[in-house]
Amino acid sequence: MRGVFLAIEKRLGLVAQVFLGLSGLALTAIVGLIVASVVMRRVVGSPLFYTEEMVGLLLCAALFLALPMVTVRAQHVRVTFLAQVMGSGGRRVLVATGGLVTLMFCVWYVWEALPWLEFAIQRGIRTEAAGLRLWPYMAVPPLSVALCALLVLVRLVSGSEADALVTDGNNSGA
């Protein structure tokens, strides 16, 4: 049964890899927009009017799109002093507790974000300067957080993160 969960975790990792690629594209677009705006300011005397708006939306998207890969790699900020003095059983409890808290947060976040997303879709809300539909940008955070929740859930059930932490008690985890 554990093999099934490890296979699911691997597939979710591939989705996180796609999200990470999209994050890189968003960051590249940010640089392109800023360069174009600077050139426009020098050549035409006026920057692109929508640069700030687009950079803000793309930065938010890039950060949330990168989040699942941080979860896959278990590279979130961690406080390790307690885990370093505990035995393997204590570290397993810490990992399980942390995973449950993370899972509860993710579920709560998605639960709260979906009505806002539905509102933006129903009203056809657009950005102020560029007039772009806002809902695709608003969909990124709950999608990314939902993927993180699935990753955490699979790891909790399979015990893969706890195993890694217990075997390397002096790492930066816990």
Image (spheres, helix red, strand yellow):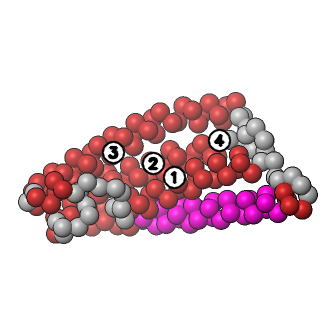
Contact between labelled residues 1 and 2, with CB atoms less than 8 Å apart: yes
Residue 103 is tagged as: 3
Q: Residue at x 34, y 56 (%)?
A: 77
Quadrant of the rendering where the C terminus is positioned: bottom left
Residue type pointed to by label 1: Phe
Magenta part of the chain: 13-39
At mark 3, the secondary structure is helix
Residue 35 x/y as whole percent: 75, 63
Q: Which residue is mark 1?
A: 64
At mark 2, the secondary structure is helix
The Cα atoms of the two marked residues, 1 and 3, are separated by 16 Å
Contact between labelled residues 3 and 2, with CB atoms less than 8 Å apart: no
98 is within the stretch colored magenta: no
Give whichever of discs 3 and 4 has the lower sequence position: 3
Q: Is residue 118 left or right of residue 145?
A: right
Give whichever of discs 4 and 2 has the lower sequence position: 4
Q: Residue at x 18, y 67 (%)?
A: 170
Examine the image and state in which quarter residue 75 appears.
bottom left
Give whichever of discs 2 and 3 has the lower sequence position: 3
Residue type pointed to by label 3: Leu
Q: Is residue 160 visible?
A: no
